[in-house]
Amino acid sequence: MTFGRPDTSTNLLPARFCFAQTLALLLLGLAPLPMGWGKVRDVLESTRSLELNRADRESSSAGYYEGLIGGGEGLQNGRNELALRLMGKPTEWVRFNAANVMNPLPDGDFLQNELKPNVRKMIFGQPFTTNSHGMRDREYTKEKPEGTFRIAVLGSSMDMGWGIGTEETYVNLLEDWLNAHAAKRGLNRRFEVLNFAVAAYSPLQRLEAYRRKAREFHPDMVIYSATMLDTRLMEIHLCDLFRGHSDLGFDFVRSTIVSAGLSDEDLRTDQEDRLVHKEIVKQKLRDKYWPLYDEALGELAAECRAENVALTCIIIPRVGKADAPAARAETVARLKGIAAHHAIPLFDLSGTFDGRDAARFEIASWDDHPNALGHHRLFLGLSRGLVGNPELYELMFLSRPNSTSTRGNLDSTD
């Protein structure tokens, strides 16, 4: 109660509730704006718009993935959560790090984390399973069966399949189609498409996943999946390596850190292992991510060729305007240039969802990962690309697994 003034708090409660309710409806776009609120309307529309400018898109994406893997800090992460709530995200919708499907690796490990083996649980009403090797996939033996053609997929959350059932991923759809096509041709051949993708894995982690895991399964082909968020994932990964005082894994990464002029002071951490000068670190590395990407894909290409393994790249989009043509153009051009630099066939699937209702293909209005229907469209695009590439088609359906006779021309681009 306020001295010298009547207590109107009780009378104000309905008004305050009405104001809060109206404000919420305005933010969600469900109520009309009063006359003269043109500027407010502009602000609200820009807040709701998915077609953000580049800096905003990258900041939003970084916050999402930092939250996805548990690396988000402070107020920005809270703001992202509030935005998701306003978009209708239910409280039971958990972030990836809260789903309890990951194993953190020992301090200093370059991969940092990996999927737990033998996971059997429901997430968002969909079965999330992993096999005994910690892959979001069916069960496979490490030793390749006779007469089997193996394809290893390296990627991140879009390829792993977040928010959909294990059997609905484009990876498993591709395996089913390859086997059906082989049977239709009367071939005595079995195809296995092994999914080594892990949510938020950067291009550097995908390279390490090939070295440490995929090659042990003796693949005949590797499909490397790229996204429009890869440089942001690389930034997050490197900053986490610095925070954990981890080994940088590759000589080309170490030399890049030196050329960026990062000092011991720049990389200093506080008592909670947070980078004290994180913004300085990010600024000094900003123009290094694409050269690092080029080096990483070059290393993968060299290793695959040395081991007589075919390598191809695909570009996988998110659903909606965040990866619309104008937004993705520069990144797609850079990815194509890097693939061409290393003579790697590339299938650009970035237009898979162009001109289509995003609500049909995303797992939720607050999460633009592709749903089961979205994965089916990605599978169709990839399978058509493989059929349309004579060298890869011959390798899969006309040559013997591990044969070297038909691989001489795989260095040419599609």
Image (spheres, grey):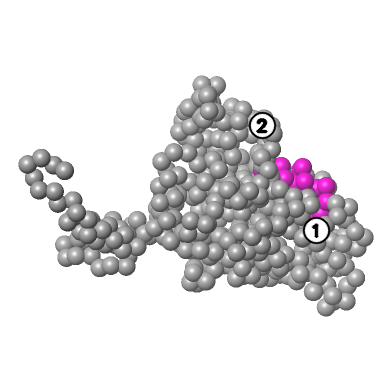
Residue 139, labelled with which disc? 1
The quadrant where residue 234 appears: top right
In the image, the segment drawn in magenta is: 205-223
Q: Which residue is mark 2?
A: 107
The quadrant where residue 315 appears: bottom right
Q: Give the prevailing secondary structure in the magenta stretch.
A: helix
Residue type at the position of mark 2: Asp
Residue type at the position of mark 1: Glu
Please determine whether, in this image, residue 296 is positioned above or below residue 268.
below
Horizontally, residue 376 falls left or right of residue 50, namely: right
* Residue 87 percent location from the top left of the image: 42, 60
Which quarter of the figure is the N terminus placed in?
A: top left
Horizontally, residue 55 falls left or right of residue 175, namely: left
Residue 251, labelled with which disc? none
Q: Is residue 211 a member of the stretch shown in magenta?
A: yes
Residue drawn at (48%, 46%), measured in percent from left and top? 63
Q: Residues within 10 Å of mark 2 (few under 14, many from 20)?
A: few
* Residue 179 percent location from the top left of the image: 81, 70
Please determine whether, in this image, residue 125 is positioned above or below residue 13.
below
